Amino acid sequence: NISTSVDRASHLVNQLLAMARAEASEHSQQALAPVDIDLLLHETVETWVVRALERRIDLGYEPSGPAYILGNAFLLREMINNLLDNALRYTPDEGRVTARVVPQGDFVLLEIEDSGIGIADDEAHKVFDRFYRVDASRRHSGDGAGLGLAITRSILRAHGGDIEVRTG
């Protein structure tokens, strides 16, 4: 119990620090550098393979080729980690999660698609609020503080982006 509590507290502290970094970058004129978001996605997906295999989830990556954006690689990696964590957390065992970048002219679309049960339309906008958590019966893992998607939204806004949840 102590070990589990320490792990949860550590995760919460790390997420609070990530939220502070994301919000600070949202309000600053940080120096951005070219980042190949497709390569960053590929590298990050590879770090989640073991967790996916433990639950027999088919974790896939569909390459698009180089897709450069101006950004902060550290924050963008944090964003991708949060999206993959949520997808794996809400996908049932033996499900599937697929990550891809889709170039769209002057911008890119990063998609994390999963075979989870989805989110009701009336809850979809709430998942980006700090500390909001979807009903515990719908997720595989009981830990988490409800900060991951709020952090993700702050990172995206700092990069001139936006996020949405789609079901179906």
Image (cartoon, rainbow, N blue to C red):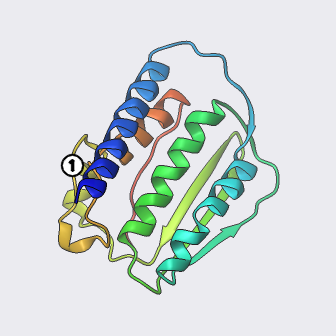
Residue that carries the numbered disc 1 in the rendered image: 132
Quadrant of the rendered structure where residue 107 is? top right
Q: Give left or right: position of 158 versus 116.
A: right
Q: Give left or right: position of 11 versus 29.
A: left
Mark 1 secondary-structure assignment? loop
Q: Give left or right: position of 147 versus 64.
A: left
Q: What residue do we see at 65% from left, 30% from top?
A: 71
Q: What residue do we see at 50% from left, 59% from top?
A: 84
Three-letter amino acid code at disc 1? Tyr
Of all residues shown, which one is farthest toward the top? Answer: 29
Nearest the viewer among 9 and 141 is 9
Q: Give left or right: position of 90 versus 162.
A: left
Quadrant, the N terminus: bottom left
Of all residues shown, which one is farthest toward the bottom? Answer: 94
Q: How many discs appear?
A: 1
Nearest the viewer among 10 and 144 is 10
Q: What residue do we see at 55% from left, 50% from top?
A: 80
Quadrant, the C terminus: bottom left
Of all residues shown, which one is farthest toward the right? Answer: 65
Whole-percent x, y for residue 120 in the image: 23, 67
| Crowd class of label 1 (few under 14; some 14 to 19; many from 20; radius 10 Å) | some
Q: What residue do we see at 54% from left, 30% from top?
A: 160
Query: In the picture shown, does residue 22 fall above or below 95?
Result: above
Whole-percent x, y for residue 73 in the image: 65, 35
Whole-percent x, y for residue 96 in the image: 52, 79
Query: In the picture shown, does residue 11 fall above or below 165?
Result: above
Whole-percent x, y for residue 159 in the image: 56, 30
